Each structure stands twice: as structure tokens, then as C-alpha cells.
Amino acid sequence: MPLFTEAKPRECGHCGRHVTHDFCRVYGDSDDRVHRCRKCDTTVRIQQGSAAGRNVRTPDPQTSPGRHGNEPGRWSQ
């Protein structure tokens, strides 16, 4: 019986960056897959379920310029 098992690499399904086992376990879907990570999404959206692949009401930082500081902008534009 092997004393250790080789861990499979874990990565974000959106941007491909490495994510930890604990992040997958806590924020991932039922198969511990992560759809969004802290590098490509906000903490608020992740806590609402975006990392598990759920649609959330908070605007996506990649489709709402200026909303999360990635580009200057205003809500009225």
C-alpha cells in the first residue's frame, strides 16, 4: 500500500492559475473544481458562489470596466 498519493494539479477553470486544495474544497463546486479564482474575480463574488460556477448578482470585474478598479470609469457611463 502506498504511503502517499500524487496530488493532481489544481487550476482555475477561467484563467488557468494554480489554486490550493483548500480553496477548491471550500469555494469549488461539488467536484472540487474552481470556475473562478481570486486572480480573475473579486472576493465578494467568490463568496457568493462564482468560484463554484454559480451566477451571482454582483457585476463581473472583467465585463464591468471601472467597477473594481481595473479601468477608470463611472457608474453613470
Image (cartoon, rainbow, N blue to C red):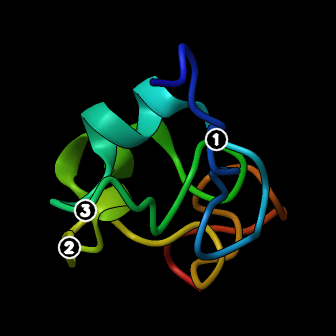
Q: Nearer the viewer, mark 3 or mark 1?
A: 3
Asked if residue 21 lies left or right of residue 19, the reply is left
| Residue 43 drawn at (x, y percent) | 45, 37
62 up-or-down from 69: above or below: below
Which secondary structure lies at badge 1?
loop
| Residue at the spot of label 2 | 54
Q: Which circle's residue, 3 or 1, is located before the other in the chain? A: 1
Front position in the image: 60 or 77? 60
Residue 54 in the figure: left or right of residue 17: left
25 or 73: nearer the viewer: 25
Residue for badge 1: 19
Residue in view at x 35 percent, y 52 percent = 45
| Element type where label 3 sits in the image | loop
Q: Residue at x 60, y 85 (%)?
A: 63
Give the residue type that dot 3 points to: Asp
Would you say the residues marked 3 and 1 are in contact, meaning their CB atoms lie under 8 Å apart?
A: no
Please report the residue visible at 57 percent of the width from the left and 31 percent of the height from the top. Answer: 5
Amino acid on which disc 1 is placed: Val
| Mark count | 3
- Gap in angstroms between the C-alphas marked 3 and 1: 14 Å
Looking at the image, which is closer to me, 8 or 53?
8
Q: Which residue is mark 3?
A: 31
Q: Nearer the viewer, mark 3 or mark 2?
A: 3
Q: Is residue 3 visible?
A: yes
